[in-house]
Amino acid sequence: MASGQLSRAEALACSGCRHACHVMLYCDTKSQLFGRLPIRHIILMQMRFDGLLGFPGGFVKPLEETLEAGLSRELLEELGVALPISVEDHADSCYAPASSHSSSSPSSRLITHFYVKKMEEEQIREVERAAASTATDHGQEVLGMVRVPLYTTKGGGGLAAFLSHSFIGNARLQLADSLLRLNLVAPEELHKALTHSLKIHTHT
Ligand code: APR
Ligand code: MG
Ligand code: MG
């Protein structure tokens, strides 16, 4: 386990810590951009109220609910669908970077838990429809769902340009780690996109 990361049990042992849970929902797809560029996977992120990109989820209350029940509650508010999340969907837990919590006192540290859930394409489309219609947070905490482009166009657009945007907390790292771990993008392609994204970022 990398430094800064905690097991789920270690994270829960910190009773004074605040906890937030977020999830990457994704599926395989056979669809193609312009009828020729394979899209390969649909990965859902969201444009948040603060203008940053992030994953759906939010603060949970471990004294009142399990991490997974708290995440499902947040997903119902943000996506408008009841999605069961299980302990097996848990990918990692870690302390949030210092900038994403207001106090440096250890007792109020924020621990972020990340989950990954693979779904069918039709279920992902249903989540997108509900998030834009029945979700109570639509237009408020959540400005809209976005799909992550995994391809690179001839002009160098696609994944690198997406990664050059601003993300909340660890979300950019959580995305890159998941792409690698789940083998959704080849390591060398991801490395190129990450390097190129930094160049795009510094030129804007
Ligand atoms: N990595 C690290 N931290 C993250 C990530 C991430 N990928 N995503 C979100 N966070 C942090 C946010 O900075 C926030 O402090 O986790 C915390 C909770 O996540 P949100 O999704 O923002 O929480 P939510 O409960 O959905 O929304 C409540 O209303 O009052 C505001 O600022 C409050 O952001 C909070 C929101
Ligand atoms: Mg929320
Ligand atoms: Mg949220």
Image (cartoon, grey):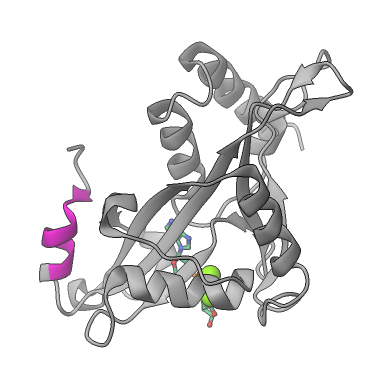
| 38 left or right of 197 in image | right
- Asked if one can make out residue 93 in the rendered structure from this viewpoint, the answer is yes
Front residue (pair 41, 204): 41
Displayed quadrant of residue 79: bottom right
Say which residue appears at 51% left-offset and 18% top-offset: 191
Task: Please say if 133 is above or below 118.
Answer: below
Say which residue appears at 42% left-offset and 65% top-offset: 84
| Quarter of the picture holding the C terminus | top right
Q: The magenta stretch spans which residues?
A: 5-12
Q: Position of residue 114 (x, y in %)?
A: 37, 54
Q: Is residue 10 magenta?
A: yes
How many discs mark residues in the rendered view? 0
- Asked if one can make out residue 96 in the rendered structure from this viewpoint, the answer is no
Q: Is residue 76 magenta?
A: no
| 167 left or right of 176 in image | right
Q: Position of residue 152 (x, y in %)?
A: 72, 19
Front residue (pair 184, 187): 184
Say which residue appears at 68% left-offset and 76% top-offset: 135
| Quarter of the picture holding the N terminus | top left
| 170 left or right of 119 in image | left
